[in-house]
């Protein structure tokens, strides 16, 4: 019964995707992976539950998405965490478009993409937690709940991309600002609105949440070994 349900879900999602606007005739699918992993992540065995995923997405999306929309995001993230192969099949269009190579073309003007991007990430990573971080990063980024920046100008742009801050007028960075110093200045302004910007340690993945949810969200991210810090 469970297998039939999964097959029906996969068929429905795949059928739905065919009515999307993506023109796959302009894309060449080619994998550099000799052999994909056959096993699935040990998600629940490692203490990563659907409740954990739900809580992270609930705190980040807050009132930005309604209940139905949140459920859709949660279901995507959970399937990616537990069955990457099935995720690539069920959410093919989504998986392709959240691929980091999406939109990039080679010297011939061709877009060559990995046909199973989430399964590939799971295959090339040695353990579950780096994969969880990459999968969640791509999903949250798609829904404008996370943004990436590596210099001061892209940090400024990130706040225009995040749903929670896109309508907030923020000061422009000073000429001598760098990424972290500008983030510190932004946090002074965000604090007036009860918000705080956090950065994944060692990288520039930026999220914004309510100040009173900062500790809770930080502890949730720690469960997938993803450290958040306030600049």
Image (cartoon, rainbow, N blue to C red):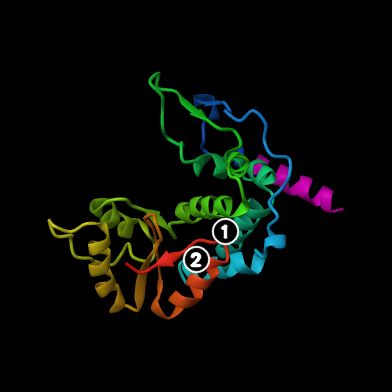
Q: Position of residue 118 (x, y in %)?
A: 59, 43
Residue sitting nearer the eye, 171 or 49 = 49
The reply to whether the C-beta atoms of the residues labelled 2 and 1 are less than 8 Å apart is: yes
Crowding at label 1, few (<14), some or many (≥20) Cα neighbours within 10 Å?
A: many
Q: Alpha-carbon distance for marks 2 and 1?
A: 10 Å
The answer to whether any part of residue 66 appears in the image is no
Magenta: predominant secondary structure element?
helix
What residue span does the magenta drawing correspond to? 1-16
Residue 16 vertical placement versus 108 (above, below):
below
In this view, the residue in front, 122 or 64, is 122
Q: Please give left or right for residue 178 compared with residue 75 in the image.
A: left
- For label 1, the residue is 73
Say whether residue 127 is left or right of residue 145.
Answer: right
Q: Is residue 171 left or right of residue 141?
A: left
- Residue 4 among those drawn in magenta: yes
Query: SS for tag 2?
Result: loop
Q: Residue at x 41, y 60 (%)?
A: 201
Name which residue lies at 67% across and 31% down. Answer: 35
The numbered dot on residue 65 is 2
The quarter of the picture where residue 44 lies is: bottom right
Q: Where is residue 76 in the image (x, y as percent from the top left)?
A: 61, 54
Looking at the image, the residue that sits furthest to the top is: 108
């Amino acid at each position: 019964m469970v297998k039939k349900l999964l097959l029906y879900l996969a068929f429905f999602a795949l059928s739905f995707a065919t009515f999307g606007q993506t023109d796959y005739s302009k894309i060449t699918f080619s994998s550099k992976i000799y052999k994909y992993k056959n096993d699935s992540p040990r998600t629940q065995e490692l203490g990563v539950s659907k409740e954990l995923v739900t809580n992270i997405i609930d705190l980040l999306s807050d009132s930005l998405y309604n209940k139905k929309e949140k459920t859709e995001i949660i279901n995507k993230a959970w399937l990616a965490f537990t069955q990457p192969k099935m995720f690539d099949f069920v959410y093919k269009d989504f998986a392709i478009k959240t691929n980091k190579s999406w939109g990039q073309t080679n010297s011939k003007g061709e877009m060559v993409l990995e046909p199973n991007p989430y399964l590939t990430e799971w295959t090339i990573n040695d353990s579950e937690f780096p994969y969880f971080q990459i999968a969640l990063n791509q999903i949250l980024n798609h829904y404008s709940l996370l943004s990436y920046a590596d210099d001061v100008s892209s940090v400024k742009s990130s706040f225009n991309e995040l749903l929670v801050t896109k309508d907030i007028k923020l000061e422009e960075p000073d000429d001598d600002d760098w990424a972290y110093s500008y983030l510190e200045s932004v946090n002074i302004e965000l604090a007036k609105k009860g918000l705080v910007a956090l950065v994944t340690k060692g990288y520039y993945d930026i999220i914004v949440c309510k100040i009173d949810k900062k500790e809770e969200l930080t502890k949730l991210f720690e469960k997938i070994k993803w450290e958040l810090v306030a600049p």
